[in-house]
Amino acid sequence: MKKFHELSEREVLALAIALEEEDERVYADFAEGLRTDYPASAAMFEGMREEESGHRRRLIELYRQKFGEHIPLIRRQDVRGFVERPALWLIRPLRIEAVRKEASTMEVETRRFYEKAAARTEDASIRQLLDDLINEEREHEERAQELDKEKLPANVKADEEKAQRRLFVLQIVQPGLAGLMDGSVSTLAPVFAAAFATKNTHEAFLVGLAASAGAGISMGFAEALSDDGSLTGRGHPWVRGLICGAMTALGGIGHTLPFLLKDFRMALWAAGAVVIAELAAITWIRHRYMDSPWVSAALQVGLGGVLVFITGVLIGSS
């Protein structure tokens, strides 16, 4: 890697061309990745892509005038001082906040590069172009920071907030809720059946632990293999699977842990209290994120839990 002060004016211009080309392609990928869910931000990045393309053409024109047709391949990774960029543009779906912050960082870095380059060049025409680009990159930086602070028109901001909420529900809430419901409800029967059949808290705990772990693994794989998220927008399948599996295991472990207590009656009452808390949490999530009315959500969740609980008690007591 070369140090920046070791670059000639020819190499500085070649590096500037490579930087503008890279930024142009990154903004194009940002625009493409955001077009469906965040059209206003996508349009902004498309405009920034076009401006970066104009910067590149002006740099190439000046380079030809000064140094001819051949442009040496000098990239940001060949020069010390540049920060390694996370490949956000390769991730689908794109996270709007991460994209906005990355765009602001890119513009700050490019502007500082032009400031350092302009300060050490002795050619008046090169300095003039770099000074112009500094001002234009500063405008890009301000635009990206405005987006990062969500200084968007009210209607655009509302639309993008709705889209962001929809993606959060699809990718995080739905798989997590499915897992929590399955873990909290389906493991009630084996845990309480074992508890009433054996009257032994340790054995009930082992049954609950096995049921929770098995259900978590099963639900995790089922969710991960359901679809790849490319058409549904539900995100990376293995992330969904991890969320669903973890929440399934958590839902079962919650009312299993009280059976670590030695006293059977106390463990039973503690487990019952945890079950009520789990069902209440599921009801709240359904109301908060799935727009289910309080009454219907409570009845659906509570009825399912009670039926499974009674089933476990009856089987364990038989």
Image (cartoon, rainbow, N blue to C red):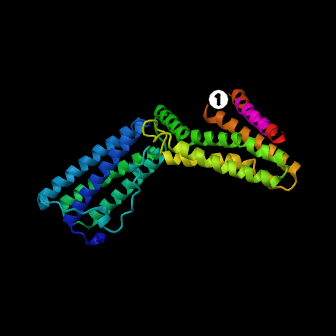
Q: Is residue 252 magenta?
A: no
Identify which residue, 232 or 83, lies in the foreground.
232
State whether residue 122 appears in this view: no
Identify which residue, 268 or 121, lies in the foreground.
268
Q: Quadrant of residue 312?
A: top right
Q: Position of residue 30 (x, y in %)?
A: 37, 45
User: As drawn, which residue projects farthest toward the front?
Assistant: 318
Horizontal side of 173 relative to 144 (left or right) equals right
Q: Is residue 307 magenta?
A: yes
Query: Helix, strand or loop at disc 1?
Result: loop
Q: Where does the magenta region start and end?
A: 300-312
Horizontal side of 85 relative to 155 (left or right) equals left
Say above or below: 317 vs 65. Answer: above
Q: Quadrant of residue 305?
A: top right
Quadrant of the drawing holding the C terminus:
top right
Q: Residue at x 22, y 60 (%)?
A: 14
- Reading the image, the residue beneath label 1 is 292
Say above or below: 132 vs 177. Answer: below
Q: Residue at x 25, y 50 (%)?
A: 55
